[in-house]
Amino acid sequence: MRHLLRTDDFSIQEIEELLRDAETFSKGGFHRILQDKIIITLFFENSTRTKSSFEIAAKRLGAEIVHLDVTKSSTKKGETLVDTATNLDAMGPHAIIVRHSDAGVPKLLSNHTKASIINAGDGAHAHPTQALLDLYTLKQHFGELKGKRIAIVGDIKNSRVANSNIELLTRFGLKVTLVAPPQFMPATDLPTTYHLKEIIDDVDIIMSLRTQTERHSQQSYASLKDYASDFCITKELVGERDLIILHPGPVHRNIDIDDALLADDRCKVLQQVSNGVSMRMAVLKKLIDVR
């Protein structure tokens, strides 16, 4: 079985196929091509958007969804993650969608299952379907993406969304600049800056990220308000510039993006959510054998 653990598990040609399928699905092509297929969701971290998005995507394609409540699973009795996965796999599902706070868990499980493993986020490592839906959102807006300039802003060092987008967007020819305070900036060969105002006139897209406070070993800022004073994307900062705003959610209002800009047509956050369903439908179609 094919797995989706990172964005580079798919070639450029395969991703272009996903983009075409997502566009078809976004126009109401909810063909029940996965009827009689079974998909298990295995989320060891809280999730609203990603989990719901996958479930709606699967149901629109006709699949049966089984949600495992990990708070009541045998992992709480000492069963290993691998044993949990192999036991679930023995029941014959076609795909298992996994989210975990530790990087590498989906990869580990993929070595022990016949079902396709889909990474719905693992630690600070990767979130491939988020990057794919972001790419789709950009493709809808701009058409041709090569040469477009994007600033990724915020807690980049701890962000699986940033990692996946950097890999994917650079493959499609976008020019990426990282904007973050020193403690949130990873080691990188990409252009970087600590100051939003330095790049605001030179980008077509700003991708704001949530501060990953749950992944900080110690407090990095005196308060989120202090962080926001330097890195919140505001209507005042953006002005009338011709650019668009992305965010993977959940948005910390007036910390990541201010209220006024969230209500602006240039902010594509809700379009990302909508596109997430279509792109995840395309991913499920790609990975699950529909013969």
Image: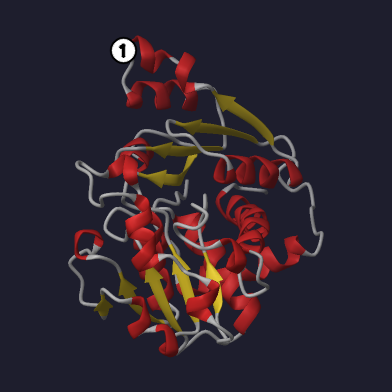
Instruction: Give residue 52's position: percent from left, percent from top.
Output: 63, 41
**57 vs 196, nearest the viewer:** 196
Task: Look at the numbered disc 1 and give the secondary structure of its residue.
Answer: loop
Where 110 falls versus 178 (above or below)?
above
Please report the residue visible at 42 percent of the width from the left and 30 percent of the height from the top. 44
Q: Quadrant of residue 226?
A: bottom left
Mark 1 nearby-residue class (10 Å; few <14, some 14–19, many ≥20): few
Q: Quadrant of residue 274?
A: bottom right
**42 vs 116, nearest the viewer:** 42
Q: Quadrant of residue 85?
A: top left
Query: Which coloring applies here?
Result: secondary structure
Where 262 falls versus 224 (above or below)?
below
Residue 14 in the figure: left or right of residue 187 = right
How many marks the image carries: the answer is 1
**254 vs 168, nearest the viewer:** 254
**143 vs 213, nearest the viewer:** 213
Q: Is residue 104 visible?
A: no
Please report the residue visible at 52 percent of the width from the left and 54 percent of the height from the top. 253
Residue denoted by label 1: 78
Q: Amino acid at mark 1?
A: Gly
Instruction: Give residue 106's position: percent from left, percent from top.
Output: 37, 41
Instruction: Give residue 219's position: percent from left, percent from top.
Output: 23, 45
Instruction: Give residue 56's position: percent from left, percent from top.
Output: 69, 43
Where 183 falls versus 49 (above or below)?
below
Please report the residue visible at 26 percent of the width from the left and 73 percent of the height from the top. 194
Residue 59 in the figure: left or right of residue 238 = right
Please report the residue visible at 58 percent of the width from the left and 27 percent of the height from the top. 67
